[in-house]
Amino acid sequence: MGTQKKAIHDLAIWGNAPSFKEPLHVGRPNIGNRQHFLQLINDMLDRKWLTNDGPYVTAFEKKISEYTGAKHCIAMCNGTIALEIVIRALELKGEVIVPSFTFIATAHSLQWQEITPVFCDIDSRTHLIDVNKIEKMITPRTTGILGVHTWGRPCDITTLESLALKYKLKLIFDAAHAFGCSYNGKMIGNFGSAEVFSFHATKCFNTFEGGAVLTNNDALAEKIRLMKNFGFAGYDNVIYIGTNGKITEVCAAMGLTNLEGFEDIVAVNCNNYECYKAELRNIPGISLLPYNKNEKQNYQYIVLEIDETKAGLNRDDILKVLHSENVLARRYFYPGCHCMAPYNAYFPHAGLLLEETDRVAHRVLVMPTGTSIDDTQIKTICSIIRVAIDNSSFIKNKLMDIS
Ligand code: T4K
């Protein structure tokens, strides 16, 4: 662990040992009460019921429904399959409007079923789909809008609902980041036709791998439930094309364990956020994306934006300094889905309409947080950033020398 005070010549890019002996990762899993989890696993092994809607899966779904207030929770093996199944169950086709500033799984879940993701720009203040730019993306082939609650911050759901109503489009949400968050006081999981959580290991609430579809629509829930089990409506009776989207009992046991400690994890994330906020105050060119204290939040992403004109260093310069210190910050969601295969070949000029996406994707840096990091480490990380920016021209020259 490093000390809080740093000077320019202490930095690892000058050949010193990094501030942190062990790497500090973004997305380090939060792990709840180990004894409780191991007890659940022991019981499961005795019971010899490992998957296919076992008692842990059923209990887990019930608890997620209660927690969010949504009528139905269908737990799945991961968020990507959950998205694919919702899209299939709603019979989306043609084109669906989606932001490009998201994890590639959002776009792939459409393209995998030969539905064209039409990339809409984001609002650079919120990093969320820009509702004022959606109408011009609608064509006769558009069947839906797939909003993403990026960083756990809900989209402008009210406006999206009225656009969906006006143009008779289906509305769904990729809520991979938004478990435990609310919009106008109502928990995420209750909006659109359905919302999809990810419970991947890197999410603040994890089930190793996992995800869930939340919906208040009985018929849709029933269809999704069948589709995630090959379309079986009973022994020897298949009524839909389906797939295998089932979550295992081990994953559900992890979910039940982590759910018990979830509010503690959120409190740690919130404390980390406040610590970053205090330590980064007044560093030129660095801004921390704020959380809305009037809503429930999970505070799981610490998102910095680097303005090179004020910092003297760009995002990638700071990334290099941090990585040399063993702080493995990430450039999520660089460079944007539209710049990745196959979308860059399908829509080579998409960037012309994605000015804000490009700008944000070149400025964002996501920092380590969660239960694996403490205030002292955060202070050291922030002092590395401060020292680098205070000495930006030295650092620029040094980075040029070593590149
Ligand atoms: N929609 C959105 C908006 C999403 O962000 C995601 C997933 C999805 C949909 C799809 O949901 P899932 O199908 O995954 O349920 C990671 C996650 O794999 C991915 O789930 C997540 N978003 C995305 C934002 O981050 P990578 O490619 O960055 O993973 P990786 O292997 O580089 O790991 C990230 C960091 O976590 C590393 O610093 C190491 C650390 N880590 C990771 C794992 C797995 C650990 O410390 N321990 C671990 O066990 O995608």
Image: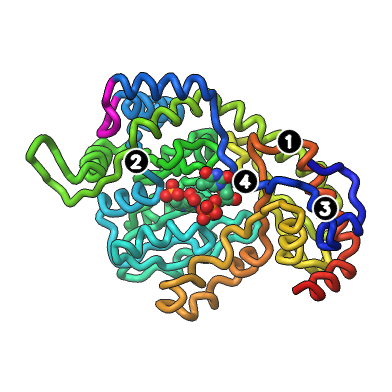
Tell me whether the residue at label 4 lies in contact with that at label 3, contact meaning CB atoms closer than 8 angstroms: no
| Between discs 1 and 3, the one toward the N terminus | 1
Tell me whether the residue at label 4 lies in contact with that at label 1, contact meaning CB atoms closer than 8 angstroms: no
| Between discs 4 and 3, the one toward the N terminus | 4
Q: Kindly identify which numbered label has been placed on residue 374.
A: 1
Residue type, label 3: Ile
CA gap between label 4 and label 2 equals 23 Å
CA gap between label 4 and label 3 equals 19 Å
Q: Is residue 187 above or below residue 103?
A: above
Q: Give the magenta range.
A: 47-54
Judged from the image, the secondary structure of the residue bearing numbered disc 4 is loop
Label 2, on which residue? 76
For the residue pair 276 and 175, the one nearer the viewer reads as 276
Residue pictured at 54% horizontal, 66% vertical: 336
Q: What main secondary structure does the magenta stretch of the protein show?
A: loop
Residue pictured at 85% horizontal, 67% vertical: 395
CA gap between label 1 and label 3 equals 16 Å
Q: Kindly identify which numbered label has been placed on residue 384.
A: 3
Label 4, on which residue? 301
